[in-house]
Amino acid sequence: MFLRRLAVAIFSLVACAKSESVRAPALDDFGYPVNVRSAPQRIVSLNPPIVELLFALGAGNRLVGRTHWDLSPDSARFAKDLGPGIRPNVEAVLGLKPDFVILYASNDNRAAANQLRAAGVNTLALKIDHIADFHKAARQLGVLLGDSARGAAVSDSVSRTIERVRSATAALPRKRVFWHIWDAPLITIARGSYMHELIEIAGGSNVYSDLPDPSPSVSIEDVMKRNPEYVLTGPEGAAKVSRDPRWSSLPAIKAGRILVADTTLVGRPSVRLGEAALSLARLIHPGSVR
């Protein structure tokens, strides 16, 4: 009888612990607690990296609202387009009757987060600017969605690919790279972005690693002074720098050392971060990673 009671007690403790993994409060990147009492069933995500993550976590069928940037996977298109995700229309969000809303933790979204919380909707504000932020989000959402093991598995899978790339390029020479993001104004990638981390993992050296911002504006004259060995850009950017006479005196452009990145891979810090690192390594160091 004692052993039977002990077994029941242990089972109860395990069951409570499993339940508490969903109920435990989490702090978002605004510092507010998120108390999810049961796994959310109607989710609005206005944070672009999160939609792909929700599908990877098996919760894509619970998505009812998204930003107009969220077109992958194709099933995401069935959720309602709620705009760009910054300063959202709170009434439109509430009209979808969500039980969970995920925002980008920008000051522009703080008022919306407060309004949604005041309306009784669980709201999670996340700022995913670095690779570590993605791993934190994957694990945190795994817990809040009721499947912490899957959250950890997604995070671990991305980590394995990234570490494979890092190991393959570790002993290779660091090629000096300028990442051209936008042309007017001229915008690049600096130390505050996950894209800077991807350059380093892929065996490159970002010529703007000294700037702390994610995507600062710079001048062509300053790029010329830094004299990168390679210009990394997207397909549209490659066409622009190849045609623009202002770039013609940069040795990298003159020599045709333009690396065209797959923007569908590198454009957001989500579940394809490992693939993004792999694609950049193959550009910067061809043949380094199979």
Image (cartoon, grey):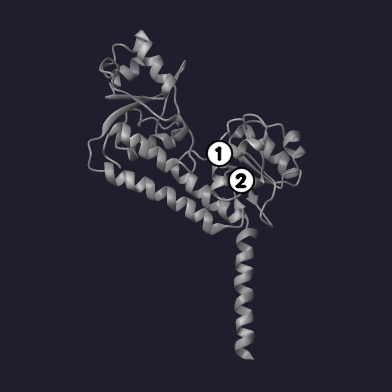
In the figure, residue 81 lies in which quadrant? top right
Question: Looking at the image, which is closer to me, 259 or 6?
Answer: 259
Provide the secondary structure element on which disc 2 rests: helix
Reading the image, the residue beneath label 1 is 73
263 sits to left or right of 105: left
Q: What quarter of the picture does the N terminus occupy?
A: bottom right
Question: Is 168 above or below relative to 251?
Answer: below
Residue at horizontal 22 percent and vertical 42 percent from the top: 171
Image position, residue 289 (x, y; %): 29, 41
Query: What is the number of the mark on residue 165?
Result: none
Residue, far front? 74
Image position, residue 266 (x, y; %): 44, 34
Query: What is the number of the mark on residue 60?
Result: 2
Image position, residue 121 (x, y; %): 72, 46
How far apart are labels 1 and 2 at the CA level?
9 Å
Provide the secondary structure element on which disc 1 rests: loop
The local crowd at label 2, few if under 14, some if 14 to 19, many if 20 or more residues have their Cα within 10 Å, is some
Image position, residue 270 (x, y; %): 49, 41
Q: Assess whether mark 2 and mark 1 are in contact (beta carbons under 8 angstroms).
A: yes
